[in-house]
């Protein structure tokens, strides 16, 4: 089966593709070539209204179904996704430029995991019974209503599923706006959900830039906003949602620490640092981009890291042998190159990479700076590209203080053979998603999300249910009412 990249239309509303060419045209550029491969149109106010109205209308009947029935639809969608993993992976690669060696194993598969997991939970979402003598209180776990999901461009299939699956399991409807950089994959998620039996209107996709997101967030029909994006966008969206007293989940950026003690298994620590910086060409929110290496292991770490980076296969993302692809866009590549120039200007030591590749597409080399200090821009700001900053440290208390000295708090990792120390250090980390002798695992069973400027709320796991439902409490009196007069 050939994969058609140009979607049938820009938006998916009320169970069907919808077009309105009056909206601004958004070209879809393949990151590996720089060539346009498709285009969509940003949603006009009429399209936004149509999507919200269809979600509002679809939500009530979806919520009226039993949890088991809703779960069956989600689990069927998970099966379809797995069956089509290859084509969905090709589309994900076209959308993002990430290599097939990643997309075949991570994107549609993790989307399917979310649909399966929350499909399984849907039938068990209940309230509780609270005895009060002869009276009692019962609670009802209710959906929030109409949820808006807004996505970043690095994991377009996964982000759509991580938001849709718990929202729909709880009986909500959703309008999802993918990033304008990667508009294709969410449409396939919508198609698959409807093929699996989702009623029309319950999951809708509209395209557009920040202003379309803004129109969704401020609409009075919307009860909840879940954003995956940068911290500056998060602050704007959170404020706009607060004005309407809407629920929020904010999955934002980070500048996470990865701490490597000199007793760590060197190969595992190097492998962890590679996963924490160069998977998806470094475009992962939870990346451990501040790699604190204890002085005793520093030179061995840098030597082995450099040797292993030499084995990266940089090239055509459609070739399954490729292990390192291009950046998502020219803009994102230029942002990363700008930070590399800043690192050199600030006096950090360029140990590896740092160059743009002389070929079509938005390729830069995996890049490592050593001798980075805490005040340098490359140690403070999120780069969202393949740029690792290696910082030295002497002892545990010092590294804990320095690791936490950031506005962000998405993730943190530690490599050590001393497990007591591993737990002690992680206990002190101001971060939501932590790793001991590992990095960047994100199974659907575990909560995922940040603290401080990295966000509020959690995706995945049973925690996500709390962010897509609310509890009604009902006091039931069996006897007479006693009133003072
Ligand atoms: P971005 O903040 O530029 O955009 C994110 C989304 O918000 C896009 O869909 C965009 O159109 C929309 N948007 C922009 N302005 C808006 C507004 N005023 N109102 C409503 N919507 C608006 O982020 P990006 O460049 O697409 O993605 C990269 C960022 O996302 C990085 O900071 C990264 O760390 C973060 N991210 C976080 C997670 C996580 O789970 N914590 C996952 C992936 C990416």
Image: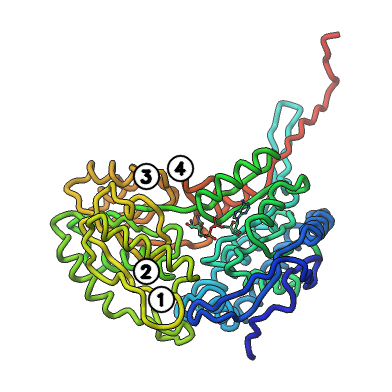
Which of the four quarters of the rendered structure image does ligand 1 lie in?
bottom right
Residue position for label 4: 452
Residue found 67% across the figure and 62% down from its top = 208
Give the labeled residue for mark 1. Answer: 363
| 427, above or below 9, in the image | above
Q: Earlier in the sequence, mark 2 or mark 1?
A: 2
As helix, strand or loop, the secondary structure at mark 3 comes to loop
Q: Is residue 417 visible?
A: no
Q: Tell which circle, 3 or 4, labels the residue nearer the N-terminal end.
A: 3
Q: How is the image coloured?
A: rainbow
Q: Is residue 484 above or below residue 212?
A: above
Q: Is residue 261 left or right of residue 27?
A: left
Which disc is residue 278 wearing?
Answer: 2
**Mark 3 highlights which residue?**
406
Neighbourhood count class around disc 4 (C-alpha, 10 Å): few under 14, some 14–19, many 20 upward: some
Q: Is residue 314 left or right of residue 374?
A: right
In terms of depth relative to the viewer, which is nearer, 334 or 385? 334
Looking at the image, tell me whether mark 1 or mark 3 is earlier in sequence order.
Answer: 1
Other-residue count near label 2 (Cα within 10 Å), few / some / many at <14 / 14–19 / ≥20: many
């Amino acid at each position: 089966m050939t994969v058609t990249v140009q979607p049938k239309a820009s938006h998916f509303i009320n169970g069907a593709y919808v077009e309105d060419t009056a909206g601004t045209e958004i070209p879809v550029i393949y990151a590996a070539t720089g060539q346009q491969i498709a285009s969509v149109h940003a949603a006009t106010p009429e399209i936004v209204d149509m999507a919200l109205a269809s979600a509002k209308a679809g939500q009530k009947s979806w919520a009226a179904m039993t949890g088991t029935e809703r779960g069956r639809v989600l689990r069927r969608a998970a099966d379809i996704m797995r069956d089509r993993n290859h084509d969905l992976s090709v589309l994900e690669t076209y959308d993002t430029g990430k290599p097939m060696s990643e997309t075949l194993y991570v994107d549609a598969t993790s989307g399917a995991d979310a649909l399966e997991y929350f499909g399984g939970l849907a039938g068990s979402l209940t309230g509780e019974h609270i005895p009060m003598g002869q009276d009692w209180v019962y609670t009802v776990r209710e959906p929030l209503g109409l949820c808006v999901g807004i996505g970043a461009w690095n994991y377009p299939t996964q982000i759509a599923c991580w938001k849709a699956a718990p929202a729909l399991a709880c009986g909500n409807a959703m309008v999802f706006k993918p990033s304008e950089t990667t508009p294709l994959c969410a449409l396939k998620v919508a198609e698959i959900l409807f093929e699996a039996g989702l009623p029309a209107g319950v999951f809708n996709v509209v395209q557009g830039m920040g202003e379309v997101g803004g129109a969704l967030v401020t609409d009075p029909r919307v009860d909840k906003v879940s954003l995956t994006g940068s911290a500056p966008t998060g602050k704007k969206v959170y404020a706009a949602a607060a004005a309407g007293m809407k629920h929020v989940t904010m999955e934002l950026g980070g500048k996470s620490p990865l701490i490597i003690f000199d007793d760590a298994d060197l190969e595992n620590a190097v492998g962890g640092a590679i996963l924490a910086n160069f998977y998806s060409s470094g475009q992962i929110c939870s990346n451990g981009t501040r790699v604190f290496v204890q002085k005793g292991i520093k030179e061995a770490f840098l030597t082995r890291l450099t040797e292993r980076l030499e084995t990266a296969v940089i090239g055509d993302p459609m070739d399954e042998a490729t292990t390192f692809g291009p950046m998502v866009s020219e803009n994102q590549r230029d942002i990363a190159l700008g930070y590399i120039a800043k690192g050199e200007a600030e006096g950090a030591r360029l140990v590896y990479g740092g160059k743009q590749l002389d070929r079509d597409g938005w390729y830069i080399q995996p890049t490592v700076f050593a001798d980075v200090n805490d005040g340098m821009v490359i140690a403070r700001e999120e780069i969202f590209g393949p740029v690792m900053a290696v910082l030295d440290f002497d002892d545990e208390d010092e590294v804990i203080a320095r690791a936490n000295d950031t506005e962000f708090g998405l993730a943190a990792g530690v490599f050590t053979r001393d497990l007591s120390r591993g737990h002690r250090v992680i206990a002190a980390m101001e971060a939501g998603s932590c790793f001991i002798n590992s990095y960047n695992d994100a199974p659907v069973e575990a909560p995922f999300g940040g603290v401080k400027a990295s966000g509020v709320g959690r995706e995945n796991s049973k925690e996500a249910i709390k962010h897509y439902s609310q509890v009604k409490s009902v006091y039931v009196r069996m006897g007479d009412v006693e009133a003072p007069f």
